[in-house]
Image: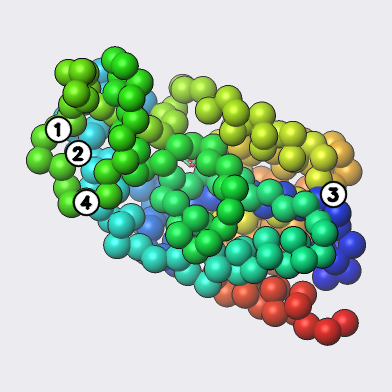
Amino acid sequence: MLAAIRNAHAMVVLTGAGVSKESGIPTFRDAMDGLWAKYDPAELATPEAFARDPEKVTRWYDERRVRCSAARPNPGHRALVQLQDWCGQQGKTFTLVTQNIDRLHQAAGSRDVIELHGSVWVWRCVECGMEREERGPLLDRHPPRCDCGGFRRPAVVWFGEMLPERALQDAFAAAEQCDLFLSIGTSGLVTPAADLLYAAKDNKALILEINPEPTPATALTDWMLQGPAGQILPRLLASLCEDR
Ligand code: OAD
């Protein structure tokens, strides 16, 4: 496996909520503490939910925003920065695509991150489209309002919505051209993000998965490193950077 990483020319890394779990941010589908075990996505993460009860939706995202602001990148995020640096030194192409909205990859130092599902830090006016970043404490007004008077919603992708076109195109272009694809901390249940792995596989890329649990994609992988990303990735990087 190390030889495959060393021999790769173009690497794509797809991350999901599992990568941020060790930073204290819950995943969506873990049976005990996943967000969707406690909350109904149909009531919080759809355009219909926002139309029905914008206050409830924006309060929930505002609480998630404040919770994310307390989170710090973990060793898994930092190892991915090292991997990007290492790829740069070796003349390899490296693309990091994330489904996470917490921006912890960027906080760790990852560059040019493709955000498929938007960001919890940004509010977008549903009338004029103006976006505004909010980093401070809980908002005092829900839903927040734009200067134009329109409601602001979180600039994240909800169920039933299209992904940002540019991010999607860039992610698929990278996946279709890569020769090594890493799927880390994602259940692989949400498309189109989950289809990136299949696009890579169609191009005969080798697939490495890192996850404490098997996923539907595990059967397609060339290697599965079973365990938490915050433990596996630093070890992987240490082995990779050792003298051959
Ligand atoms: P999920 O909650 O579906 O899956 C999280 C994955 O992380 C699971 O496969 C866990 O086994 C794994 N995991 C848990 N702890 C881990 C750790 N320490 N290290 C590595 N992996 C770990 O989250 P996503 O796959 O990200 O979409 O979900 C995809 C999308 O579904 C999200 O972006 C969100 C959600 O609905 C939107 O909000 C649009």
Give yes or no for contact between labels 3 and 2 (Cβ–Cβ under 8 Å).
no
The quadrant in which the N terminus is found is: bottom right
Q: Is residue 120 visible?
A: yes
Beta carbon of the mark 2 residue lies under 8 A of ligand 1: no
Residue 146: name its quadrant: top left
Q: CA distance from mark 2 to mark 4?
A: 14 Å
The residue to which callout 1 is attached is 142
Comes first in the chain, label 2 or label 1 = 2
Q: CA distance from mark 4 to mark 3?
A: 41 Å
Comes first in the chain, label 4 or label 3 = 4
Secondary element at image label 4: loop
Comes first in the chain, label 2 or label 4 = 2
Between disc 2 and disc 4, the foreground one is 4
Give yes or no for contact between labels 2 and 1 (Cβ–Cβ under 8 Å).
yes
The residue to which callout 4 is attached is 136
Q: Where residue 193 sits in the image (x, y, percent)?
A: 61, 37
Left or right of 139 on screen, residue 13: right
Q: CA distance from mark 1 to mark 4?
A: 15 Å
Residue at x-position 74% and y-position 40%: 174
Q: Amino acid at mark 1?
A: His
Residue reaching furthest left?
140
Comes first in the chain, label 1 or label 4 = 4
Residue at x-position 71% and y-position 34%: 172
Picture disc at residue 191: none
Q: Amino acid at mark 4?
A: Gly
The quadrant in which the C terminus is found is: bottom right
Secondary element at image label 3: loop
Secondary element at image label 1: loop
